[in-house]
């Protein structure tokens, strides 16, 4: 070959690194274009197959590795990645619902999921109805001939009710209805969704899986090939993809996830128990506590609780006072999400979020991070003194 121009030299290199390098971290593969060895390979490539690579959007060795590990943690066989937890939720609903179908959503559902259900109802002719999260086997009475999907969330990520997933799944399957579970709170560690009957498990990898409050990503995990293929088609049509660097960050986080989850759990139970004895607090909504709605189900089906729980303040305190309490916290950031190393606190006005919410006092949701537990308690104590 004749001497190459500098432009060609910059884009085509003859160098290949020597084989034999090995290290624990999964390599980061950056790719939009994927190269085929010949035209026949290009024409025979199938983006649905995890046995070959076709385009960066459909997977690289980095993302395939992450998918396989997430599926193993949850006890599934297939996994699809999305650029956020909400993107994963959207991908499921748009794959499984069409005009004229009906979906049942728990009344304590993640609020963006609620808004997505309303959008589907208002603009796409899908009936979206909300049910009591503690309905259990009574869900059977709500199923209509056009009901296609029942959405579940365990527990509700603000109000913390724990649904009887086994009863809901049994009732749904008796009528041929699919059940999807948002299992973000338990992360596949404290509960495996397929073990209690879910057909589809969704997780926001933004939480414990990454653990650093620095990644947006979601996952959809399945066991059934036909269900996976329907969602994979939605994944392709919506152009869902994740970058190699973010996938690598989640892969790195997975190796310490159980240790971190258990540390969050132990600290959160200690903080919650301390709050339970405070006169300012009317209720502690923590699934591991006996008076939390659905505690008996949590005790039967779950092995842990992580770092997220809520408290309801005594009704004598106004929303403005509780906002001042949150502002006075020094070690707690004010922000959504959970599962990161830093503690968070968010006040909620539940009367505007939930039908028939029984409490009049303001609610605050805590994410207990990995700071010293006694330091967190001292911080809450000083902030309570400013109510």
Image (cartoon, helix red, strand yellow):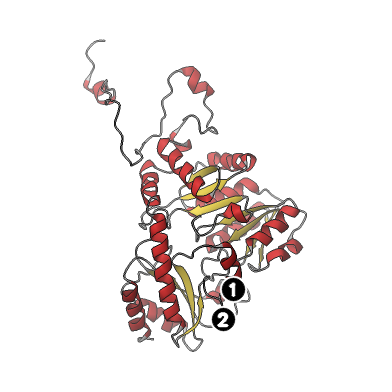
Residue 229, above or below 207? above
Which mark, residue 309? none
Tell me where residue 122 sits by quadrant.
Answer: bottom right
Observer-side mark, 2 or 1, equals 1
Q: Residue furthest right?
A: 145
Q: Residue 44 placed where, x, y %?
A: 53, 22
Q: Secondary structure at mark 1?
A: loop
The residue identified by callout 1 is: 293
Crowding around mark 1 (Cα neighbors within 10 Å: few <14, some 14 to 19, many 20+) is many
The residue lying toward the viewer, choosing from 224 and 327, is 224
Residue 140, above or below 276? above
Q: Residue 338 placed where, x, y %?
A: 42, 63
Q: Residue at x 28, y 24 (%)?
A: 16
Residue 361 visible (yes or no) = yes
Crowding around mark 2 (Cα neighbors within 10 Å: few <14, some 14 to 19, many 20+) is some
Q: Residue 186 placed where, x, y %?
A: 50, 60
The residue identified by callout 2 is: 359
Residue 339 visible (yes or no) = no
Tell me where residue 235 sits by quadrant.
Answer: top right
Residue 45, above or below 292? above
Is the N terminus in the top left, top right, bottom left or bottom right quadrant? top left
Q: Residue 242 placed where, x, y %?
A: 43, 44
Q: Give the CA separation, mark 2 to mark 1.
A: 13 Å
């Amino acid at each position: 070959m004749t001497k190459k121009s500098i432009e060609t030299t910059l884009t085509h290199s003859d160098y290949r690194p020597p084989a034999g390098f090995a290290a624990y971290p999964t390599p980061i593969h950056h790719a939009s274009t994927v190269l085929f060895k010949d035209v026949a390979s290009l024409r025979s490539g199938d983006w649905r197959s995890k046995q070959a690579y076709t385009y960066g959007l459909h997977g690289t060795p980095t993302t395939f590795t992450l998918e396989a590990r997430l599926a193993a943690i949850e006890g599934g066989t297939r996994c699809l990645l999305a650029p956020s937890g909400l993107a994963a939720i959207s991908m499921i609903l748009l794959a499984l619902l069409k005009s004229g179908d009906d979906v049942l959503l728990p009344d304590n559902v993640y609020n963006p999921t609620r808004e997505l259900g309303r959008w589907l109802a208002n603009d796409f002719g899908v009936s979206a109805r909300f049910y009591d999260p503690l309905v259990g086997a009574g869900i059977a009475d709500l199923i209509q001939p056009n009901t296609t999907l029942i959405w579940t969330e365990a527990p509700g990520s603000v109000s913390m009710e724990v649904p009887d997933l086994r009863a809901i799944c049994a009732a749904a399957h008796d009528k041929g209805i699919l059940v999807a579970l948002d299992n973000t709170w338990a992360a596949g560690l404290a509960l495996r969704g397929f073990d209690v009957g879910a057909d589809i498990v969704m997780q926001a990898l933004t939480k414990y899986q990454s653990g650093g409050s620095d990644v947006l990503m979601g996952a959809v995990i399945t066991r059934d090939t036909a269900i996976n293929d329907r969602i994979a088609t939605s994944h392709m049509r919506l152009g869902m993809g994740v970058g190699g660097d973010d996938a690598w960050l989640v892969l790195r986080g997975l190796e310490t996830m159980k240790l971190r989850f258990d540390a969050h759990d132990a600290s959160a139970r200690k903080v919650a128990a301390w709050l339970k004895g405070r006169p300012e607090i009317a209720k502690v909504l923590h699934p591991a506590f006996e008076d939390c709605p659905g505690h008996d189900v949590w005790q039967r089906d779950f092995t842990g609780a992580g770092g997220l729980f809520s408290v309801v303040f005594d009704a004598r305190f106004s929303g403005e006072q509780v906002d001042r309490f949150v502002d006075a916290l020094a070690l707690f950031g004010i922000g959504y999400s959970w599962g990161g190393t830093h503690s968070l606190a968010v006040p909620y006005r539940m009367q505007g979020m939930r039908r028939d919410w029984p409490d009049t006092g303001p609610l605050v949701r805590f994410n207990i991070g990995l700071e010293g537990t006694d330091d967190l308690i001292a911080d809450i104590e000083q902030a309570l003194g400013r109510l």
